[in-house]
Image (tube, rainbow, N blue to C red):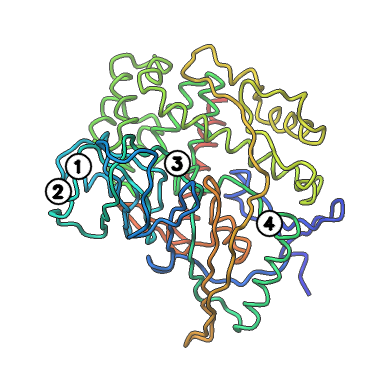
């Protein structure tokens, strides 16, 4: 029998909604599981090869070496390759290739961006590079397989989705219990049409999930507050001297010029901000305008993702998961969004969430064009395709390891589905970037610390 102290069940409209009970995820709007059955425990991504991802092309072909290649027009200056990589993110792999080929990053194109801590297969294009040049490279942790040439570069979004093969390790239950729970969770998710389509932690910044706060205050014209949060909150993957410098700046004990000396060349946005503020220390608006449209759009876009998460959680809490069979789409607030055209339930909750954040739809049509962001709609539920439990086996420690296979459309976070099975706020053993591998425990602490610092700075300004 489940204890009320363990988790609280909310029964609304015939649906049981199970809270995730995570202070960190709740701060990002991620509050509920879509399934009720107890999880299998364990963690994914214990090893790099536990998380294998293959892109799926728009014509539904799984990306792998030796795949067929049928571009709209053969020939052209863009060579297309299958990029196989391990423990590298997509940009990290491209930087390695760019250095060895002696070409700029701008010559590369990709259909999607893949996590670092995994074994992934994806398509990339390189301008004016042939198969012979690539064969001569000395590559580690990545391989390139030549497919052919086409007349256009690959662009982000040119894929149907991704196929995942994921090992969940060290589940503290017998094999029979683990497989039974997986099948029951899938039955529950299939009955409502999928799992909650949250924007997950990766969208907000692993270990430093502050992008949504920066985007919010840029929209509200609180340019100084946005700047101090962005520059002053340290990231645990940075060297300690940079973390200490950020903290000194956060506390008001370091100038823009001094902080600039600590910033590595890869921190392009911080460097641009600090250079401008060194020339005009109080012109925070001008500094963000100088940074440019791409960075600003990303930050405000993350805030829109946060609003979507909150709307989704409120809809589930008040109306239950079955409401999404009636209302399959929910708004991502932005200018041009017609609230009056939304179903009444979604309209009421969207207004409530916006008011709680002191934001209106009009705020997204900012007086300065660089800060404007359109609204759109997103599926409330993420549909699971081609699900299969491939293997379950006992371990010497009397646990169970299980291998799952499934496909998701682009823009959907696999970690959300893994969370449903594992029933843990962060169902991944390690988060990873090029500098450092973060354990689950480290991630929880640093994420909480970053959010706490950002909110403290906001409250102190008031």
Q: Residues within 10 Å of mark 3 (few under 14, many from 20)?
A: some
Q: Quadrant of the N terminus?
A: bottom right
Q: Residues within 10 Å of mark 4 (few under 14, many from 20)?
A: many
Q: Nearer the viewer, mark 4 or mark 2?
A: 2
| Element class at badge 4 | strand
Q: Residues within 10 Å of mark 2 (few under 14, many from 20)?
A: few
Mark closer to the chain start, 4 or 3 = 4
For the residues labelled 3 and 1, say whether their Cβ atoms are less than 8 Å apart: no
Q: CA distance from mark 4 to mark 1?
A: 47 Å
Give the x, y percent position of residue 208: 45, 44
Mark closer to the chain start, 3 or 2 = 2
Q: CA distance from mark 3 to mark 2?
A: 26 Å
Q: CA distance from mark 1 to mark 2?
A: 7 Å
| Element class at badge 1 | loop
Q: Classify residue 292 as left or right of residue 340.
A: left
Give the x, y percent position of residue 23: 61, 51
Mark closer to the chain start, 3 or 1 = 1
Q: CA distance from mark 3 to mark 1?
A: 21 Å
| Rendered residue at 31%/39% (across/down) | 150
Identify residue for label 2.
133
For the residues labelled 4 and 2, say whether their Cβ atoms are less than 8 Å apart: no
Give the x, y percent position of residue 322: 79, 51
Identify residue for label 4.
33
For the residues labelled 1 and 2, say whether their Cβ atoms are less than 8 Å apart: yes
For the residues labelled 4 and 1, say whether their Cβ atoms are less than 8 Å apart: no
Q: Which mark is residue 365?
A: none
User: Residue pushed farthest top?
Assistant: 367
Q: Is residue 337 above or below residue 422?
A: above
Mark closer to the chain start, 4 or 1 = 4
Identify residue for label 3.
158
Q: Residues within 10 Å of mark 1 (few under 14, many from 20)?
A: some
């Amino acid at each position: 029998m489940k204890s009320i102290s363990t988790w609280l069940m909310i029964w609304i409209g015939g649906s049981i909604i199970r809270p995730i009970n995570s202070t960190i995820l709740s701060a990002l709007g991620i509050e509920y599981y879509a399934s009720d059955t107890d999880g299998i425990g364990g963690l994914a991504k214990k090893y790099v090869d536990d998380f294998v991802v293959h892109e799926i092309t728009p014509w539904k072909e799984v990306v792998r070496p030796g795949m067929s290649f049928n571009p709209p027009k053969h020939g052209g200056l863009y060579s297309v390759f299958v990029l196989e990589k391990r423990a590298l993110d997509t940009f990290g792999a491209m930087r390695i290739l760019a250095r060895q080929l002696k070409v700029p990053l701008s010559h590369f194109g990709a259909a999607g961006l893949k996590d670092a801590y995994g074994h992934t297969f994806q398509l990339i294009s390189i301008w004016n590079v042939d198969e012979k040049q690539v064969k001569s490279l000395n590559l580690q942790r990545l391989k390139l397989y030549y497919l052919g040439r086409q007349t256009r570069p690959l662009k982000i979004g040119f894929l149907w989705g991704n196929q995942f093969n994921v090992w969940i390790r060290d589940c503290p239950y017998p094999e029979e219990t683990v497989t039974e729970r997986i099948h029951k969770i899938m039955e529950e998710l299939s009955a409502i049409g999928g799992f909650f389509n949250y924007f997950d932690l990766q969208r907000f910044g692993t270990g430093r999930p502050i992008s949504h706060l920066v985007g919010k205050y840029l929209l509200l014209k609180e340019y100084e507050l946005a700047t101090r949060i962005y520059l002053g909150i340290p990231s645990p993957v940075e060297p300690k001297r940079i973390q200490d410098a950020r903290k000194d700046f956060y506390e008001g004990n370091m100038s823009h010029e001094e902080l600039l000396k600590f910033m590595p060349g890869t921190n392009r946005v911080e460097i641009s901000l600090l250079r401008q503020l060194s020339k005009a220390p109080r012109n925070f608006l001008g500094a963000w305008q100088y940074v440019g449209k791409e960075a600003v759009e990303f930050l405000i876009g993350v805030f829109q993702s946060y609003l979507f998460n909150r709307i989704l959680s409120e809809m589930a809490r008040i109306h239950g998961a079955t409401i999404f069979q009636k209302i399959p789409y929910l708004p991502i607030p932005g200018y041009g969004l017609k609230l009056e055209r939304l179903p009444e339930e979604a309209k009421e909750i969207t207004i409530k969430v916006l008011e709680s954040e002191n934001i209106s739809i009009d705020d997204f049509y900012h007086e300065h064009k660089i800060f404007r962001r359109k609204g759109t709609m997103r599926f409330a539920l993420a549909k699971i395709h081609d699900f299969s439990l491939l293997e379950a086996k006992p371990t010497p420690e009397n646990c169970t390891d299980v291998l799952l296979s499934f496909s998701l459309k682009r823009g959907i976070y696999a970690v959300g589905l893994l969370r449903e099975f594992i029933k843990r706020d962060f169902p991944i053993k390690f988060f990873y970037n090029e500098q450092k591998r973060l354990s689950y425990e480290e991630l929880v602490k640093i994420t909480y610390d970053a959010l706490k610092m950002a909110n403290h700075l906001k409250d102190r300004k008031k």
